[in-house]
Amino acid sequence: MTKADMVNQIAAKTGVEQEKVKQIVQMVFDGIIDVLVAEGRLELRNFGIFEVRQRKARLARNPKTGAAVNVPSHKAVKFHAGKEMEEKVATAGEAVKIE
């Protein structure tokens, strides 16, 4: 699913025009980024936790050539799903019977 698909679904469910929904969705995403930049952690109950982590420098391999490549230390965002999300995702395919 893309952001545009999400906007279309929300607009259809709420009756709000797509342009307004698009702005709101973008504001939510921008807000998540702003909190991560400022504080390094964002916890959304029943959804999950976004956290900025420092990755160590390491030696990797280029899969095409096999040559060694130095990967410098860098920051990356880690996401840990909340309990409710994990439960729903885990049971999502169980309700469908394939015969």
Image (cartoon, rainbow, N blue to C red):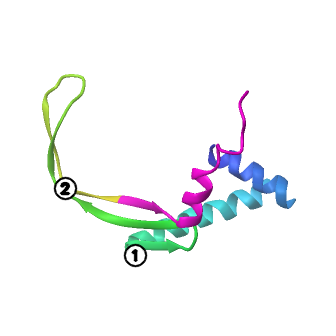
Q: SS at mark 1?
A: helix
Q: Quadrant of residue 67?
A: top left
Q: SS at mark 2?
A: loop
The residue where tag 2 is placed is 73
Q: Position of residue 29 (x, y in %)?
A: 56, 62
Considering depth in this image, is 67 or 48 the residue closer to the camera? 48
| Residue 56 seen anywhere in this rendered image of the structure | yes
Which residue is at 38% across, 60% downward? 77
User: What's the distance in space between the residues labelled 2 and 1, CA to CA?
Assistant: 20 Å
Q: Position of residue 66 (x, y in %)?
A: 16, 25
Name the outermost residue toward the top.
65
Compared to 79, does 34 lie above or below? below
State which region is magenta.
77-99
> In the image, 82: left or right of 28?
left
Q: Position of residue 65 (x, y in %)?
A: 19, 22
| Residue 16 seen anywhere in this rendered image of the structure | no
Q: Earlier in the sequence, mark 2 or mark 1?
A: 1
For discs 2 and 1, the disc positioned in front in the rendered view: 2
* Disc number for residue 38: 1
Compared to 93, does 67 lie above or below? above
